Amino acid sequence: MSRRLVATLVALLVVSAACGGTSGSPSASNAPYRVVATTSLFADLARLALGDAVQIDAIVPAGIDVHTFEPAPSDVSKIAGADLVLMNGLGLDEWVVSLVDAAKQSNANVLRLGEDLDSYGFQYLFDSEGLPDPHVWLDPSAAELFLQKIASRVVEDRPTLTSEIRAALDEGRASLQAQGQAARIAFSAIPESRRKIVTFHDAFGYFARTYDITIVGVAIASPGQDPSAREIAALIDAIRAAGVTTVFSEVQFPSKVLNSIAAETGATVLADLYSDALGAAPGDTYIGAMRANATVIVASMQR
C-alpha cells in the first residue's frame, strides 16, 4: 500500500468521523434511493438495470484505471450517503472496502457484481495462479447478469420501484442482447485464421471467448508493471508468427510499450479499446464501448 493511499485512508476516517452517524440504516421510503458504483462502467450498467428510478454515481472517473486507483477523502461522502454500493469484486476494486469502513457503512449494503456468477451457470476464466479473471463484464452474458443482480437487489430494498425497474431492466436487457448479437454476426464473418488480437493487458479473455477470438499475447501481465525485455521479445516473436498486423491500446493506459513493439514488428497501434473504463463518446456507455470495441477490432481483421 502506497504512502499516499495510507494518508488518504487516514483522511477518510477523519472525514467520516466529522460526518457523524451512519448511513447503513434504510432510507425513508420517500427519499431517493442512491446507488454508488466503483467505476463509471458499473454505474452505466446500473442505469441500464434501473433507468431513472434511482440516483446513480461513480467513484472512479471515466478513463482512469480501476486497478491502481487511489481514493480521495471526498469519496467517503459518496459512500456514506449510499443505499447500495456496487463493486466488481474478484480482486479488481477491493480498495472500496476501505471507503465502506471509513464511511461506517454496512457491508450488507455492498453488492459484488462479478462474484458468484457460477451459480447462474456462468463459467469463469482463471489465471496461472488459479484466480478468476475479474473482467467478466466484457462477456455480454455476464453484463446481463450484472443487470439482474442490481435490479433484484434494489427491488428488494425498495419494492415501490418494482414496476419502474422491471420496465428499465427489460429495455436494458434488450439493448445488451441486440449489441451482442450484432457483434457475433460481425465476427462470424471473419475467417477464424484472422480472428487474432494483441492487447495492452490481459483483460479481454471473456470478450475473446464470446466471439471466438485468439489472444496472441498482451503487452503487460498486470497494470502498473513493466514487461521485461524477455517478455517483450517473446511477444514480438508471437506477433510475427501469428501474422498479427494490429495491436490495441486501452483508453486508461499509455501505449509506449505497444509503440515499441509495433516498431519492431511493423504492426500498427490502433484505437484505444474500452476494458476497465469508459471514455468519451461513443465509449461513454457500456453498450457504446462494446460496440466501439467490436467495430474497430472487426475492421482490423478485415485488412
Image (tube, rainbow, N blue to C red):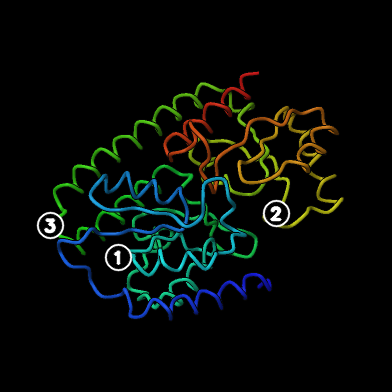
With 195 as the anchor, is 43 left or right in this view? left
Q: Kindly report the distance in space between the C-alpha atoms of the residues bearing marks 3 and 2.
A: 46 Å
Please name whichever residue, 247 or 12, is drawn nearer the observer in this view of the structure.
12
Q: Residues within 10 Å of mark 2 (few under 14, many from 20)?
A: some
Work out which quarter of the rendered image holds the N terminus and state it: bottom right
Helix or strand or loop: what does disc 2 sit on? Answer: loop
Helix or strand or loop: what does disc 3 sit on? Answer: helix
Q: Which of the two marks, 3 or 2, is nearer to us in this view? A: 3
Q: Which of the two marks, 2 or 1, is nearer to us in this view? A: 1
Q: Are marks 3 and 2 in contact (CB under 8 Å)?
A: no
Find residue 221 and name its label: 2
Q: Amino acid at mark 1?
A: Asp
Q: Amino acid at mark 2?
A: Ala
* Residue sitting at x 13%, y 48%: 163
In terms of sequence position, does the residue under pointer 3 or pointer 2 come before the other? 3
Q: Position of residue 296 (x, y in %)?
A: 57, 27
Q: Position of residue 273 (x, y in %)?
A: 59, 37
Q: Amino acid at mark 3?
A: Thr
Find residue 83 and name its label: 1
Find residue 160 and name its label: 3
Work out which quarter of the rendered image holds the C terminus and state it: top right
